[in-house]
Amino acid sequence: MRVATFTVGGERRVGRVDDIDGTVSPFDIPAGDADTGVAALISRNGLLPGTLSPIRLDRVTLDAPIPRPRRNIFCVGKNYHEHAHEFSRSGFDTSNSDGAVPKHPIIFSKVPETVIAPAAEVIIDPAVSTSIDYEAELAVIIGKGGRAIARENALEHVWGYTIVNDVTARDLQSRHDQWLVAKSQDTFCPMGPFAVTRDEIDLADTPIRCYVNGDLRQSSNTRYLIFDIPTIIATISAGVTLRAGDIIATGPPAGVGIGFDPPRFLKAGDVVRVEIEGIGVLENAVQEIRH
Ligand code: MG
């Protein structure tokens, strides 16, 4: 099932997407619940509400699948081999992980307020950062919380997946060692366009690509993750209780801006397009802040 969170007539709704008809059928749930997006479905323990009349997708404004997560988004750093090497070479890596490829997953987070809608603008502020980068990533949406989740049961805790662009201020990432500020600048987490249930994605073979202004930058496959999703879930939940609705961004493949020499940072007017087969296309323009 493919699900959209969207606004129509000034009201937020969550609905089931029909790709063939190009429509979305809103679930019959209270407006207050729909404000939480896909989280409203997850909290119903798999019992799907009925749907209302379908609406053409081109008549609605898509929101992020979970427009305001309940807490920080968990993220994994350096989780594809080639990216781990390009990041190490770039001079921006202060993670001290004793070599390019980490022995254990690097886990950091972004604040919930970074999340923006599929067509919203990423805002860059040259007074704060002059080296803003894109990171196309598959994101896991937790369906069933838990602590000490075993690898072999981990996928049962996954509701589904979406796309995030883990936008990063590289100068801040390097300067402050800890990554929270570099990763949590306002508008730095485009998410969407849809969320899909876990049965829609084959983790052993899902292509992931990122284009900037039509130029292919990142192209890989989820099969090349260093730490797979069960390992990531087991690692975090070992001592941090995961909750339904938590989001985990699994890391970017090689081809981010700092992978180039000289680096290719984002600038006003750029358009970043992330594609993950089975989920869709997340496309966001970049604009400079207007003071
Ligand atoms: Mg990232």
Image (cartoon, grey):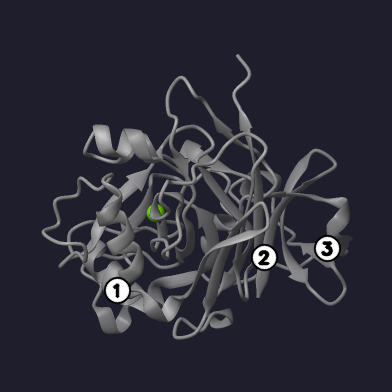
Q: Are marks 1 and 3 in contact (CB under 8 Å)?
A: no
Secondary structure under tag 3 reads loop
Q: Which residue is mark 1?
A: 226
> Which of marks 3 and 1 precedes in the sequence?
3
The residue that disc 2 covers is 3
Residue 270 position in % (x across, y down): 64, 43
| Quarter of the view holding residue 269 | top right
Does the image show residue 44?
no
Can see residue 79?
yes
Residue toward you, 209 or 236: 209
Quadrant showing the C terminus: top right
Secondary element type, mark 1: loop
Between 183 and 129, which is closer to the camera in this rendering? Answer: 129
Query: Residue drawn at (88%, 60%), measured in percent from left and top?
Result: 56
Q: Position of residue 147 (x, y in %)?
A: 24, 65
The residue type indicated by label 3 comes to Leu
Residue under numbered circle 3: 52
Q: How many marks?
A: 3
Residue at 49 percent across and 70 percent down: it is 159
> Ligand 1: does it lie within 8 Å of the C-beta at label 2?
no
Is 149 drawn above or below residue 4 in the view shown?
below
Specify the amino acid type for callout 2: Val
Q: Residue furthest top?
A: 291
Report crowding for label 1: few under 14, some 14 to 19, many 20 or more residues within 10 A (C-alpha): many
Measuring from the top left, give residue 212's x and y in whole percent: 61, 53
Which residue corresponds to the image point at 67% horizontal and 62% vertical from the top-left? 281
Q: Secondary structure at mark 2?
A: strand
Instruction: Report the front residue among 149 and 228.
Output: 228
For the N terminus, the image quarter is bottom right
Query: How much space separates mark 3 and mark 2, taking CA atoms?
Result: 14 Å
Number of residues whose C-alpha sits closer than 10 Å to that of mark 2, classed few (under 14), some (14–19) or many (20 or more): many
